[in-house]
Image (cartoon, rainbow, N blue to C red):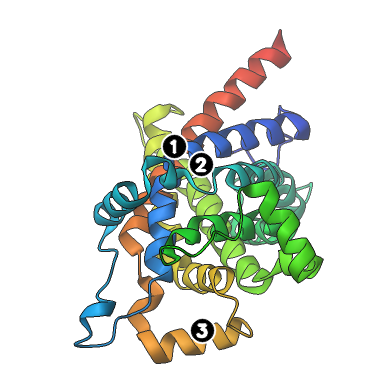
Amino acid sequence: MVNPGNAASDISFAGTFACSAFAACFAEVCTIPLDTAKVRLQLQKTPVAGDVLTLPKYKGLLGTVGTVAREEGLSALWKGIVPGLHRQCLFGGLRIGLYDPVKNFYVGKDHVGDVPLSKKILAGLTTGALAISVANPTDLVKVRLQAEGKLPPGVPRRYSGALNAYSTILKQEGIAALWTGIGPNIGRNAIINAAELASYDQVKQTILKIPGFSDNVFTHLLAGLGAGFFAVCIGSPVDVVKSRMMGDSSYKSTLDCFVKTLKNDGVTAFYKGFVPNFGRLGSWNVIMFLTLEQAKTFARGLSAS
């Protein structure tokens, strides 16, 4: 991902897209139980003081994972995996695959030397916004499937699976409903994508200038952890609004969701699920970037042979 100057990539866009989609899907499979826990925590409303009946059902990352597994079975932790993989094929492939070309476009063909951090951030914002505009329906279905465990016992499930969810939403709510939450989702994914890719790019570039460090797995590990941390710190408030809008259709707009969340649950609600979110994004970024670097090395070998 760190190229000298604006040098053209030694892998075609199709190759980069395939490597990115594979790495993102592999990371998704490994970490979606943490994402399910994060969604449940974010959708959980603040209980009314003194009301025993509304005590929080989910408490903490491991507590939420344990509660879901105990009450709904282990398979419930992988709810939303099918649309999750749909999402990563589209969103992961596009946002990562387009990052270097867009970054090089912003610096210009005559640029020499390291790419400024501002251009990396701008490239991340651009590719994140473009990619999620295409992949929003997959994100919507994923969140709705993950949130279904909140339904009271005896209430029939809305969807039997990912494909059924797509068709049901189309029939009952119209095609526009598949882009519900597109505003906060563009904001969230543009910001998080910029935080992830720009920080990974910058941290890796900085580490490689330190004597003794090389472009190896340890460097990728450190850069991936940095990318996950910055992504969660910056994107958590937007992530909460996105999850609530997609999981609860009662909100009229992004602003309405933001105001109601702030009024009813307070500022801390915007960082609800922060620990599982970091556990999710931190581990997701490490797995994704490690896999991506190895996949690209493999692709280069195929091109050279």
- Cα distance between the residues tagged 2 and 1: 5 Å
Q: How many residues crowd around disc 1 within 10 Å: few (fewer than 14), some, or many (20 or more)?
A: some
First of labels 3, 1 by sequence position: 1
Q: Quadrant of the C terminus?
A: top right
Give the left or right position of residue 68, taking residue 115 as reference: left
Asked if labels 1 and 2 touch by Cβ distance under 8 angstroms, the answer is yes
Would you name the residue on which mark 3 appears? 258
The residue drawn where x is 45% and y is 50% is: 227
- Choose between 87 and 226: the one closer to the eye: 87
Above or below, 4 against 231 in this view is above
Residue 85 lies, with reference to residue 291, above or below; the image says below
The spot of residue 126 in percent (x, y) is 70, 60
Residue 31 is drawn in which quadrant? Answer: top left
x and y percentages locating residue 50 in the rendered image: 19, 87
In the structure shown, which secondary structural element does the residue marked by tag 3 occupy?
helix
Residue at 40% x, 75% y: name it: 270
Residue 135: in sight, yes or no? no
Q: Which residue is mark 1?
A: 30
Of mark 3 and mark 2, the one earlier in the sequence is: 2
> Could you give the CA–CA distance between mark 3 and mark 2, rounded to whole angstroms?
28 Å
Q: Relative to residue 180, is residue 220 depicted above or below? A: above
Between 224 and 246, the one nearer to me in the picture:
246
Q: Amino acid at mark 1?
A: Cys
Residue with the most extreme bottom position: 263
Assign a secondary structure to mark 1. Answer: helix
Identify which amino acid the numbered label 2 is placed on: Glu
Disc 3 versus disc 1: distance between alpha carbons? 31 Å
